[in-house]
Image: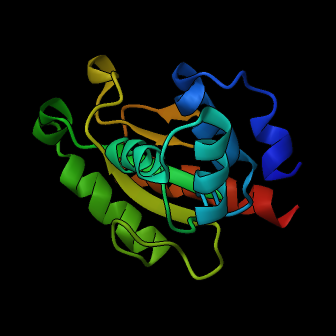
Amino acid sequence: MSTQEIIQQFEPKQHNLLHILHALQDAHPENYITEEALEAAAGHLGVTKSTVYGVARYYTMFSLKPRGKHIIRVCASPVCELLHVNDIIAALEEELSIKTGETTKDGLFTLELSECLGQCQEAPSMMINDKIFNNLTSARIREVIQSFKDEARK
């Protein structure tokens, strides 16, 4: 679906901006919002490109640079920190051979931090795309990542 086709699904009202940005990002194979998409959204809503850009930069769920097929967001809240999320981050970085903020060479994973995933009762937690994983351990990290790699090979 083209950028224009995606945008046309939404009424040209400013309160639809977040919905439009999510739809544009989700439709892009590299999980990001292009300059063209920012301009098209601004035109559709009758606002400046800088307005749309500001919203896209403010929310951490949006990206203006290419990312992997699977976005891994690790909760870095104080609760997760108390429950050794730094060990989880280190395990992910080792398993993926990347640092936080980077994308694997095969374009399969991007590793990001999130301020809170709302899963404090089962921390530490991470989200891969739309799926939450709780009570993480280094062993569980390897298992989860391997399942995504196996699925990609099918």
Residue at image x 50%, y 32%?
A: 132
Residue 101: give x, y in percent of width and height. 37, 66
Residue 100: give x, y in percent of width and height. 33, 66
Residue 14: give x, y in percent of width and height. 53, 25
Residue 66: give x, y in percent of width and height. 57, 68
The total number of labels drawn is 0
Left or right relative to 11: residue 144:
left
Q: Nearer the viewer, residue 32 or 145?
A: 32
Residue at image x 53%, y 31%?
A: 18
Position of the C terminus by quadrant? bottom right
Q: Quadrant of residue 119?
A: top left
Up-down: is 47 above or below 18? Answer: below
Up-down: is 103 above or below 87? Answer: below
Q: Nearer the viewer, residue 4 or 21?
A: 4
Residue at image x 86%, y 52%?
A: 2
> Is residue 114 visible to the viewer in this orientation of the structure?
yes
Up-down: is 31 above or below 129? Answer: below
Q: Nearer the viewer, residue 20 or 99?
A: 20
Residue at image x 29%, y 36%?
A: 124
> Is residue 68 visible to the viewer in this orientation of the structure?
no
The chosen color scheme is rainbow
Q: Quadrant of residue 152?
A: bottom right
